[in-house]
Amino acid sequence: MKGLFIQVRSYERSVQLLMVNQFTINLGFYMLMPYLAAHLSGTLGLAGWIVGLVLGVRNFSQQGMFLVGGTLADRLGYKPMIIAGCVLRTLGFATLGLVDSLPALLAASAATGLAGALFNPAVRAYLAADAGERRVEAFALFNVFYQAGILLGPLVGMVLTGVDFRVTCLVAAAIFALLSVVQIRALPARRADAKRQDGDGGQGVLAQWRGILANRPFLLFSVAMIGSYVLSFQVYLALPLEVRRLGGDGESGTAAVAVLFAVSGLSTILGQTRVTAWCKARYEPGQALVRGLAAMGLAFVPLLAATAVPVPESRIGLWLLAAVPPTLAALLLAVGTMIAYPFEMDTIVRLSGDRLVATHYGLYNTICGIGITVGNLGTGVALDAARAAGMPALPWITLVALGLACAAALYGLHRTGRLAAPSASEALPAAV
């Protein structure tokens, strides 16, 4: 851990602050969001479809506005968008804890989603700009702080929600309010490189978007990477469902699910920087991405193998079958993500030609967000079909195939040179 902080201190103050900010953002977000559905359906007594609507509005407002948030960051600067996102989240979280009318809940949910769309592309573009040639290592450290917030947030939220969910909301809002003040006082103003932006500044927003949409390597890369997000999301969807299917909803099942999340988060916190250093010394970025996606696909092989094992009659044997294969899958997913993530973030900057970087991040997030929605729907269908047909291996075969197919697509892009940085004239083709 000491080595981790030494690495962080080797970066500029702005990069250090962005990493701590991301930990705090995730801490505040994940201490509230896992318990929101229970509050809406339990405390407020809302119907299931209304709960789904409130949660869906948050997701839609974030995914649908990423491109706008990235564009604003490139035009107005990264710092204003980061501050605006933190302020919006402060208002949204406080409102969620204080109101019970549907219009107010929808407005608050939309505000929290829009907040993410404003600061996510800006933070990543800012980090890429100030990290310079050390982008890959910076994004590795960034992921450590990111995962630490995800790991700690639900634990803090569980304690606070045990008192009152409104307390959780107000504490989360206070965290974002404090974060807003810190950004205003301590985060240096930062915009995209003026020299690189000069050629884009005369273009309107639609012309810039058309130029990005004409960047074929970037779009192909974005589509190929959808699989990584669908696969990593299964830590929250398919793996817990499999644990519950075998281990039940009692304390043993809950403990097994907790182990899942702990393994996923802790392995990243402890291993990310070492994995990145090892990969960077041996592989080109495209090769690392291929290996990362392949590892994520193969993560579901333990679950596939477990379907051939007869269900034990003993309680201990059943718990082991419910806990061990999903935990191995979560660990391998984390390893695959550790391999791919820093190179993924770096590749987006390279494919953008280092121009309109936040806008590229925004469009990338939107494409992957849509892919996650479609992929989770497909995973749900596969899980239902597996139960109905008595074919428990079906979901795991599907997910393994998805990972290997995406790895093959990335291999093709790498072999044909499409993951290399474009020339200045190719980075943003002229809009027509």
Image (cartoon, rainbow, N blue to C red):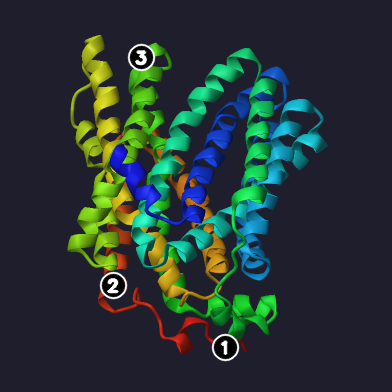
Q: CA distance from mark 3 to mark 2?
A: 45 Å
Residue at disc 2, secondary structure: helix
Which residue, given by chain and number where applicable, does mark 1 sit on?
A: 430
228 horizontally vs 415: left or right: right
Residue at disc 1, secondary structure: loop
Type of residue at label 2? Answer: His
Q: Position of residue 69 (x, y in %)?
A: 64, 60
Residue 343 lies in quadrant:
bottom left
Q: 354 or 46: which is nearer to us?
A: 354
Type of residue at label 1? Answer: Ala
217 horizontally vs 196: left or right: left
Q: Is residue 61 visible?
A: no
Q: CA distance from mark 2 to mark 1?
A: 25 Å
Quadrant where the image shows the C terminus: bottom right
Q: Which label sits in the foreground, 3 or 2?
A: 2
Quadrant where the image shows the N terminus: top left
Residue at disc 3, secondary structure: helix
Q: Position of residue 107 (x, y in %)?
A: 77, 42
Residue at 51% in and 45% down: 22
Q: Earlier in the sequence, mark 2 or mark 1?
A: 2
Q: Is residue 165 above or below residue 325?
A: above
Residue at 54% in and 17% down: 159
Q: CA distance from mark 1 to mark 3?
A: 59 Å
Which residue, given by chain and number where applicable, does mark 2 sit on?
A: 414
Residue at 65% in and 36% down: 52
Which residue, given by chain and number where applicable, does mark 3 sit on?
A: 252
Q: Position of residue 62 (x, y in %)?
A: 63, 51
Q: Is residue 39 above or below residue 383?
A: above
Type of residue at label 3? Answer: Ser
Q: Are marks 3 and 2 in contact (CB under 8 Å)?
A: no
Q: Earlier in the sequence, mark 1 or mark 3?
A: 3
